[in-house]
Structures are given as C-alpha cells and as structure tokens.
Amino acid sequence: MNAPQNLVILGATGSIGLNTLDVAARHPQRFRIFALSANERTDALAELCLQHKPRYAVVTHAAQAVALGARLGAGTTEILIGQPGLERISAHPEADCVMAAIVGAAGLAPTLAAARAGKKLLLANKEALVMAGPIFMEAVRTHHATLLPIDSEHNAIFQCLPNFLSGDLGSHGVRRVLLTASGGPFREIPLERLQSVTPDEACAHPNWVMGRKISVDSATMMNKALEIIEAHWLFGATPEQIRVVIHPQSVVHSMVEYADGSVIAQLGNPDMRTPIAHALAYPERIEAGVGSLDLSSIGRLDFASPDVARFPALRLGYRALKEGGTSPATLNAANEVAVSAFLARRLPFLAITAVIEAVMNQSPARALATLDDVLDADSAARRNAALQIETMAARV
C-alpha cells in the first residue's frame, strides 16, 4: 500500500475545512493531516491540532500564536504566522495535496504558491482564480500542478466532461456548460422586501450550510457570477458557452450539453463531502459519509431561468468576464467590501450590487500581466467601495 498523502488544509475551521477533515478521517491509510490554518478561530484550531496532530499550524497574528502554543504545549505541531506561514505550508516539499479553502482574496497568495510548487491543488477558493485567472492557470501549466475543483458546480462539470478534455470545448463536441443555482433564500420573496432583509435572513440558505460571506453571495447570486468566471478559466468556456439555471432542490449540481444534444448531469445530495472526496481520491472513488440519493422521496426536479432584475450580480459577472483584465479582481474586491458592510448592518441588501456596479463603472479594465497588477486593482477597488458605502450612508 502506498504511503498516506500529506494533506494541507488552508482554512481548516471553515465548513470546507471541517468537511475535508471528516472525509480524511474516514481513510487514515490514505491521508495524513500535515498542516492546518485558521484566521480567527484559534480555539477551534487548537482542538483540531490536538485531534489530528499536524506538523504545522498557521494563525494570522503573533498573539494568536502565543495562545495556540499555550493550548498545545510542547508537542509535535510547529506554529507559523501570517502569509509567509501559509505560503510555506502550501509549497512545503513534503506536502502532497493542498485544500485551498480560505475565503476571499486572502487565499490568493498561498493558493498560487501551491500551484507554483506543482502540488495536487483542491480549489475551493474561487476568488483566487477569479482575481488572477491567467496568472494562476499559467502557474498550474508551467509547474505541472494538478488542479481539481471543489465547488459543487465545477466539480460536477469536471465529472461530466471527457477525461481527455483540454483547450477549446467546441473541438471536443461540447456545446455549453450549465451551472445550476438554488436561487438562495430570496428566490421567491417580493422584490420590495429585499431592501429590508437582514444578514441573518440572507445567511439562512435553504439547502447548504456555509459561512456567512458565501451565504450572502448565494443570496445575491454573486457566488454564481464568480463561478461564471471560474468556469471560463477551469474549462476554457466562453461567456456564450456558460448558462446559469435555477434549480431549487440542489440535487443536480451542474450539467454539460454536447453537440449531439446529449446533456450529462451529476446528481447527489447537497453535501460538500461528495466533491471533496472525489477530488481527494481522484481518479479513484472513496466513501465520503454521504447517504444515497433517494429520487423517489424528492419527487420532482425543477429548473428555471434566473431573474436578472432580482439578481443583477449575474449581469456583473458576465460583464467582468467579457471585459477581462483587472475587471474580475475589481468585481471580487468590491463585493467583499460591500458584503462585509451588509453583515455589519452598514449597508442594505440591495446596495451590495449597487456598490459593486458603481466601482466597476469607475474602474476601467486594465491589462493583467503580473500579480502586482491584481493586487493594485484589488486595493483600488476596496478603497473605492469603502467611499461608495460612506457616500450612501451619508445620504440616509
């Protein structure tokens, strides 16, 4: 039997990180927990370290390192700090597989470090690919990294595409990819109610258990806008080859339509352990702890076109992809700032996409050649978004 894979989990205390640990724990002969990281949940990270005994743990600040060290005592886990620590574990020569599950732009540098180190890279951090798509994919190709998508939609598309696929979809008989979306918690409520919805309401997803930021992204469907851009880079799909379909049951995770009219779909219960297990063991299949899908009890599968008036974020996602260059980084950064303001109750729900569009209108797309170009666009968009939010607050 082969030696267990050394597994690095960036964002270990989030839902993706915890689900990854759950799947890995079911197969101790296959996976060894090599390194874990967390942003704010130091106590939760301490419990995970005591349970899994990784060689490394990474926290954000020195004070957290002191607190974590006090909890762990003198043991086998070395504590690292900040971005240098994240990049070190991501590119460590003994790391075999990196789960990139840090939410937002903060995950870009360590995820890129894993790609440049030629790792088996499980991508749950869609923002890294959205912000720096051409740079990221060039790093994957140049350094022969193995890139496996974890988003349920992109993992589904990956499973529905032929194994030999590379380059242009059309040349392989693919007509388009169909990204399914639940529609989130506000799919059917009256439009006039959206102005007054609360953060708790926005985070109450009907099908998935997720962190608060991504839950808000689901409510606005900005998560789907980001996934449109992600699908372009992962699969070489043009904007015209990517269609979003509302599917409230979240059973069909996405589909691929072929030139002969065939549509191949991947179905399963809405449980992130399925795509995580698929990517961890790829190209093999392993037990994930997920129950069998009972279609007879579900009874029906519904599909509908999205209402762009209700979900203007979709229009902004297609716009950013078509503009290219720094536009996707601008979209992502403005969204992160606007969502943070909404969660802090400083911005109404409908103003999230209004802020993003205003920032995009004031930030013409520029060429993207280096990581500095990405970071400059990100910083400028964050400053602009903060000003937009201040201006809106002053009007109230």
Image (spheres, rainbow, N blue to C red):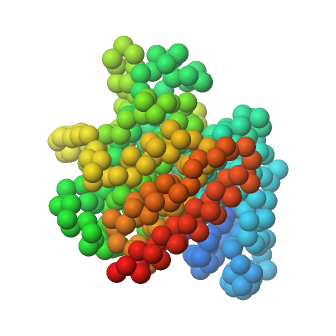
Left or right of 296? Residue 4 is right
Task: Please identify the quadrant where the N terminus is shown.
Answer: top right
Left or right of 347? Residue 303 is left
Left or right of 1? Residue 176 is left
Above or below — where is 138 with respect to 62? above
The part of the image, by quadrant, that contains residue 259 is top left
In the rendering, at what x and y percent does residue 256 appear?
40, 28
At 25% from the left edge and 65% from the top edge, which residue is drawn?
A: 194
Q: Residue furthest top?
A: 260
Above or below — where is 191 with respect to 344? above
At 27% from the left edge and 54% from the top edge, which residue is drawn?
A: 310
> Which one is nearer the viewer's eye here, 259 or 390?
390
Instruction: State the count of labels.
Output: 0
The part of the image, by quadrant, that contains residue 233 is top right
Left or right of 31? Residue 155 is left
Task: Please identify the quadrant where the C terminus is shown.
Answer: bottom left
At 44% from the left edge and 56% from the top edge, which residue is drawn?
A: 357
At 57% from the left edge and 50% from the top edge, which residue is drawn?
A: 364
In the rendering, at what x and y percent does residue 371 appear?
73, 51
Above or below — where is 210 with respect to 27? below
Q: Is residue 384 visible?
A: yes
In the rendering, at what x and y percent does residue 184 appear?
31, 56
> Which one is nearer the viewer's eye here, 83 or 49?
83
Above or below — where is 119 with respect to 172? below
The part of the image, by quadrant, that contains residue 216 is bottom left
In the rendering, at what x and y percent does residue 198 appear?
31, 74
